[in-house]
Image (tube, grey):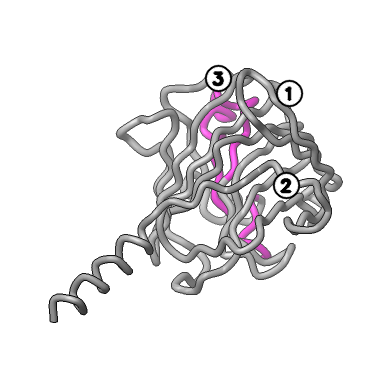
Amino acid sequence: MKRAFAAAVSLALSACAATNVNLSTINDGKSWKVTHAAVETLETDGKQAVRLIAEGDSANGIVGLALPPGVEFSEGTIEVDLKGRNLRQKSFVGVAFNVVDERTFEAVYFRAFNFRAEEPWRNRAVQYVAWPTNTWEHLRTNTPGQFEHAVNPAPDPEAWFHARIEVTDNQVKVFVDGSKEPSLVTNRLSGGGVARPVGLFVDTGAGHYANFKVR
């Protein structure tokens, strides 16, 4: 009985352990699955980072995804350092999860150029989507204000910031730079409970990513 209990505890702890995703292999052409994006590794601001450059536009049904090998996710926490640009409509950086294919996934991403913008743009700084049906256009038109929000306190739009995304079977919460209050709380619009690929997201422009962890 003691051995069975110990094994159960070990399994539970293993399931909760964080996976530090190795970003250095992203452009080896073998391990990661990268779609609609160019990639490069670099050291910047003291971080070992990745730069993703989008090769399409979500307005045309194309976003860039970079999925690491052997990392699947159903519920838990995703953490990553991100750096966008203060360039309107040219900086959309975040993470994708529950990825079925390049057009079927959930994502949380940030519009860095809206971090310190005037309203209503400030209230469009962080966004949740669930493709292919629930794009940002569909959600903003049909459920305004429910799936996008301001980020408080607002980061420097040209600097690194840390994002923590907590995912349960029916909800997503987004925390920025260690804040105890979420910048966004939404209901999930796609079925959870299935372990599927998780990775990096970029749309219309480029962004930097570092310290990617999945728990």
Horizontal side of 206 relative to 199 (left or right) equals right
Q: Which residue is mark 1?
A: 87
Q: Nearer the viewer, residue 180 or 48?
A: 48
Q: Position of residue 49 (x, y in %)?
A: 66, 32
| Structural crowding at the residue carrying mark 3, measured as other residues with C-alpha within 10 Å and reported as few (<14), some (14–19) or many (≥20) | many
Q: Position of residue 189 (x, y in %)?
A: 50, 64
- The magenta stretch is 109-136
Contact, mark 1 vs mark 3 (Cβ under 8 Å) = no
Residue type for callout 2: Thr
- Relative to 52, say whether 98 is above or below: below
Q: Image quarter for residue 112?
A: top right
| Structural crowding at the residue carrying mark 1, measured as other residues with C-alpha within 10 Å and reported as few (<14), some (14–19) or many (≥20) | some
Residue drawn at point x = 57 percent, y = 64 percent: 98
Q: Position of residue 89 (x, y in %)?
A: 74, 32
Give me the C-alpha separation between circle 3 and circle 2. Answer: 34 Å
Q: Which residue is mark 3?
A: 116
Q: Residue furthest front?
A: 3
Q: Nearer the viewer, residue 70 or 170?
A: 70
Q: Residue furthest bottom?
A: 1
Q: Which residue is mark 2?
A: 25
Residue drawn at point x = 55 percent, y = 37 percent: 211
Give me the C-alpha separation between circle 1 and circle 3. Answer: 12 Å
Q: Nearer the viewer, mark 1 or mark 2?
A: 2
| Structural crowding at the residue carrying mark 2, measured as other residues with C-alpha within 10 Å and reported as few (<14), some (14–19) or many (≥20) | some
Residue type for callout 3: Arg
Residue at disc 1, secondary structure: loop
User: Mark 3 or mark 1, which is nearer the start of the sequence?
Assistant: 1
Residue drawn at point x = 40 percent, y = 57 percent: 76
Residue type for callout 1: Leu
